[in-house]
């Protein structure tokens, strides 16, 4: 293997071993926490972390692989070997420094090193004070040890760059180097799967430390730099105290005349089946003023359940809707908190709240949970079981995204036969996502995008109807509350503008055997957001809602019910009498009047400040 054309493989292997050694150093440095992990969990730290390690290795290998490709075309006297050694030495020093800095920062902060320390670069005195209590001598020894081990590893595994074999053309050598460079694309994105690697791919345990230990520090730093979550608050329009006071006033409770009317359940601890419907815009649900005959099963369920007609999505993407629904947390105008595992670890979650009340839990999704970093969020939430695309047989992964919705519902029905009650089951559909392919004959004519979307929503509703017909025959049905809500709305049909309230209008239906007979057929017109769903559900179960401070019980509304949502660098603020949308970049209203502009700006400022502080 000591030849010119094995050098790139050896170089890649060298960095990969270095990162695995750095992981071992992290575990040893935090041995009291590592010792609490089982042998299997310790092995999985390395196994699950391998994809991020390989991704970081690939990024570090781009320049050397390019140099080797270009250097093959240059004269033999070109100092290619010295350039490679210089680059590797600099990269090794930086990687070792970050690795050692992370050891102590993790002890203090509880999350792996990211771009957060960069916000202190303009205050070196504070940085020095923060480092004052760190054991500098032991850390320096670890740094020197890592550097020495890294150089020994490079010398042993890579060594000097061999010369080209006699008679081997430089063009052929450059072509071989180019092939190696192209192959880096696979580890760069963490494999050949549809979704590039992210932190979710290394989250495997209910113990946060095990998940954190699997993260690659250099990869995490660069990733967080691109995400830019550190502030300052670019939505500062008033003093923080004024914004906080304005938001508190928004959540001031209204006088309640009839508390009995707010009680919907006939049993104190029903099972909860929480179904999140992909892209189910209110424009296609008859009960919320939409088109008839697109969602007949959901419409029928709404007539015998409780229908909320003025609910709005907090954002415009699945990952944003997920956090708003399950954690009652608002969206951010240009990012999503789900991208930052260390922040989502500090959010409340329905699963955690219900687990404390004795609920078993299971999350179902027919696609890949790594999508948009959902898996890290769900693992942190503490679900007892996660079922995703890889858990379905290959012949059932029959859509571009994974398993179609009727397959997903069939799996849930099978599992619920042996599920311990009370249970909290969360299911996220996917078939009404682009490209809108469905496994049943189309109901609506046309091949335009709106027709395809309409047919995909009809299919998911058809699959829901199949599920309901069987579910009503099961012994658990009479003691079950069904929650059906969309993850977000859609610009179709009608091609709504990005900020249009119609794009964010979604249905919310509560149904199931656990409803009181007198609650059936009730229509609630209170304005609200996805962030209000979790407090509303918990209030029905008689469980605490204080951790969900960005939402309120829609059945015991605030003095001025409202809905707040974010689009790309802008927000909407809706009440029963006023609607406005505001563009943050242009600093102007795009619709509506200024009646509630100050309240909308206060909400955006306060919620984004809360996001920055997480």
Image: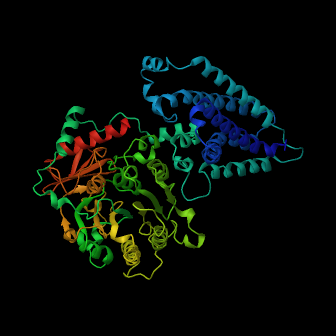
Q: Is residue 263 visible?
A: yes
* Residue drawn where x is 62% and y is 57% of the image: 192
Relative side of 223 to 151, left or right: left
- Above or below for 89 versus 553: above
- Above or below for 448 versus 69: below
The quadrant where residue 14 appears:
top right
Residue 240 placed where, x, y %? Answer: 24, 33
* Residue drawn where x is 45% and y is 24% of the image: 121
- Above or below for 299 versus 137: below
* Residue drawn where x is 43% and y is 66% of the image: 429
Name the colour scheme. rainbow
Residue 237 placed where, x, y %? Answer: 24, 36
* Closest to the observer, 21 or 594: 21
Residue 393 placed where, x, y %? Answer: 59, 69
* Closest to the observer, 554 or 493: 554
The quadrant where residue 600 appears:
top left
Residue 436 placed where, x, y %? Answer: 44, 71
């Amino acid at each position: 293997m000591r030849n010119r054309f094995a050098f790139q493989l050896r170089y890649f292997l060298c960095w990969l071993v270095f990162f695995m050694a750095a992981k071992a150093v992290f575990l040893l440095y935090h041995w009291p926490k590592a010792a609490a992990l089982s042998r299997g969990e310790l092995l999985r730290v390395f196994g699950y972390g391998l994809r991020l390690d390989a991704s970081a290795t690939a990024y570090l290998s781009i320049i050397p692989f390019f140099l080797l490709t270009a250097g093959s075309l240059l004269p033999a006297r070109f100092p290619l070997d010295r350039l490679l050694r210089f680059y590797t030495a600099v990269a090794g020093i930086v990687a070792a420094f970050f690795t050692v800095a992370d050891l102590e920062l993790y002890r203090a902060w509880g999350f792996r090193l990211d771009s957060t320390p960069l916000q202190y670069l303009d205050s070196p005195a504070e940085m020095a004070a923060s480092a004052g209590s760190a054991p500098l001598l032991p850390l320096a020894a670890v740094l020197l040890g890592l550097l020495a081990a890294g150089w020994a590893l490079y010398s042993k595994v890579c060594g000097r760059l061999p010369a080209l074999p006699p008679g081997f053309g430089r063009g052929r050598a450059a072509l071989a180097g180019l092939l190696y460079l192209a192959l880096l694309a696979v580890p760069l994105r963490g494999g050949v799967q549809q979704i590039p690697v992210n932190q979710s791919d290394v989250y495997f345990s209910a113990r946060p430390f095990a998940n954190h230990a699997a993260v690659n520090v250099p990869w995490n730093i660069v990733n967080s730099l691109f995400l830019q979550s550190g502030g300052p608050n670019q939505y500062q329009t008033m003093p923080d105290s004024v914004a906080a006071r304005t938001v508190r006033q928004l959540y001031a409770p209204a006088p309640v005349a009839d508390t009995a009317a707010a009680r919907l359940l006939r049993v104190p601890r029903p099972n909860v089946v929480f179904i999140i419907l992909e892209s189910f815009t209110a424009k296609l649900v008859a009960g919320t003023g939409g088109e008839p005959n697109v969602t007949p099963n959901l419409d029928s369920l709404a007539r015998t359940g409780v229908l909320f007609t003025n609910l709005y999505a907090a954002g415009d993407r699945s990952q944003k809707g997920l956090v708003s629904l399950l954690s009652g947390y608002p969206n951010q105008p240009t990012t999503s908190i789900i991208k930052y595992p260390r922040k989502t670890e500090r959010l409340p979650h329905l699963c955690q709240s219900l687990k404390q009340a004795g609920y078993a839990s299971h999350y179902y999704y027919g696609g890949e949970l790594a999508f948009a970093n959902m898996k890290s969020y769900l693992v942190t939430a503490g679900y007892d079981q996660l079922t995703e695309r890889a858990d379905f047989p290959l012949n059932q992964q029959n859509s571009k995204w994974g398993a179609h919705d009727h397959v997903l519902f069939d799996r849930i029905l099978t599992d619920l036969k042996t599920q311990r009650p009370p249970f909290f089951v969360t299911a996220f559909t996917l078939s009404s996502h682009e490209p809108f392919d469905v496994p049943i004959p189309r109901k609506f004519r046309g091949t335009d995008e709106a027709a395809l979307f309409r047919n995909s929503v009809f299919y998911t509703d058809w699959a829901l109807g199949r599920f309901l017909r069987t579910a009503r025959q099961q012994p658990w049905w009479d003691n079950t509350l069904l929650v059906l809500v969309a993850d977000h709305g859609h610009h179709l049909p009608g091609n709504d503008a990005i900020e249009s309230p119609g794009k964010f209008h979604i249905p919310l239906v509560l149904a199931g055997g656990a409803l009181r007979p007198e609650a059936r057929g009730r229509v609630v017109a209170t304005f609200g957001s996805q962030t209000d769903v979790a407090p509303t559900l918990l209030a029905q179960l008689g469980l605490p809602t204080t951790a969900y401070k960005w939402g309120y019980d829609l059945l015991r509304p605030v003095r001025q019910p409202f809905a707040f949502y974010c689009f790309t660098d802008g927000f909407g603020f809706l009440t029963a009498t006023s609607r406005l949308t505001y563009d943050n970049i242009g600093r102007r209203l795009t619709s509506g009047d200024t009646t509630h502009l100050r309240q909308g700006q206060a909400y955006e400022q306060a919620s984004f400040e809360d996001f920055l502080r997480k």
